[in-house]
Amino acid sequence: MHIERVKIPGAFPLIFIIMTITAMLTWVIPGGRYERTVNQDGREIVVDDTFQLVDRDPQGVFALLQAPIKGIVQTARIIAFILLIGGVFGIIDKTKVITASILRAAHRLEERAYLVVPAGMLLFSVFGAVFGMSEEVIPFVLIFIPLALSLGYDSIVGISIPFLGAGLGFAGAMLNPFTIGIAQGIAELPIFSGIGYRCAVWGVVTGAGILMVMRYAAGIKKAPEKSPVYEQDTQRRERLREEEAEQVQFGTGHRLIIGVFFLTIAMTIIGVMRYHWYIDEIAALFLGMGLVSGCIARLSLDEIAGSFIAGARDLVGAALIVGFARGILVIASDGMIIDTVMHALSATISRLHPVFGAQVMFIIQSVLNFFIPSGSGKAALTMPIMTPLADLTGITRQTAVLAYQLGDGLTNMIVPTSGVTMGVLGMAKIEWSVWAKWLYPLVLVLTLIGLVLMVPPVLFRYGPF
């Protein structure tokens, strides 16, 4: 997937450009509004067939400058989570447990390095498909990047194993309660029904992603200089060699810290699946893990605090991008154009053949990811509209859910408005523009696969079971 260098604006300039364009559109697109209600889960959803034109509220320069501040306020919880995770792994890094573990694992896996990419991505894909692993993937980046470097790959491969793995599973999810569960509930379908075809979708999407990353990884192992992060990785490899020369031993303290880490992961999985935990609870677990790890490593209070601050500092840029990106949605919402656009798109779908209508549903969901990267938030906005629209156009409701599911997952791995994407890149210290140039061929391939996967459900009337 190595491609020629093309100039792409960095995340901050790109987001500000899109904010400006969105503000300009509020002067052109008529204002509109759907009525909204609260469903039995306490979620606010739109009411279909209630759209009406209202006076537009054009957003000027002052509104444009206020949007990032409002966006930061609205995403304060996600921003805090990103900073806290960075701080916790600043403490973990100080204990040298990552270095000791990676050096040990690299020696043991040296003869079977080719299995690390498919096995690792498959494991994380299962996590993404079953319990919607998303924010939880951020800490694994600091583990898999040095492992990938030690095995002769690059940081891109290190990111891909946990992040793309979980993202592929999220897109092809069989049981994800945060996307499938919510969307099917709104569409009045039995929860997790239609799992048979979704298993096939998961297999195709995950397999395609793994094959493309394996091909890239093999090429980088033969010619490391072709990596888009070659210079950055050269410095990282030098640091690993220096730490190896220091003969960091894998001791009892490191074993205990790893035990605490995996206990935290296990508690996170149980909490998410059984008790519906979200950011607050997960953040508390990881903060506890960081403090306990610092105590096990016998770090002083000043060392723990200093490491935490240093780790959080590394993710300030990624955290701010999340808030700035939310500013796009703020402008569109305040300008009253989101519902107007959704109404126009739904009218377009109603005039298409069911196969093309289903594919357009998928594309719409993919594009909306840039403005609404939250899966549950997008379900609340779009599914009340797409569900009756599917009934009118001869598309089954299950197919409409599939269009939402694939559209929600595939582009989330590249859009700079995703808090998880920017948190991962911030943790890896890789520019979004570098990641986007590398990843977009894979996203294009997966999009084409998604369009093909939307055809059989229409032809065979994909139903509840």
Image (cartoon, helix red, strand yellow):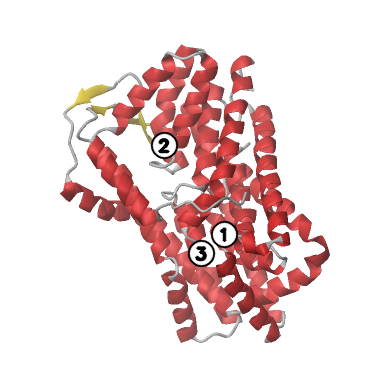
Separation of residues labelled 2 and 1 (CA atoms)? 29 Å
User: Which element type, helix, strand or loop, lies under badge 3?
Assistant: helix
Q: Is residue 33 above or below residue 134?
A: above
Q: Would residue 445 appear left or right of 367 to someone viewing this image?
A: right
| Location of residue 26 (image quadrant) | top left
Q: Nearer the viewer, residue 102 or 292?
A: 102
- Relative to 429, is 367 above or below? above
Is any part of residue 186 visible from this angle? yes
Q: Which of the labelled discs sits on residue 427, or is there none? A: 3
List x then y, in percent, for residue 287.
50, 68
* Kind of residue sitting beneath label 2: Leu
State how far apart marks 1 and 3 are (Cα). 17 Å
Q: Which residue is mark 1?
A: 228
Badge 1 or badge 3: first in the primary sequence: 1
Residue topped by disc 2 = 368
Instruction: Please tell me which of labels 3 and 2 falls first in the chain.
Output: 2
Q: How many marks?
A: 3
Query: In the rendered structure, which amino acid carries the disc numbered 3?
Result: Met
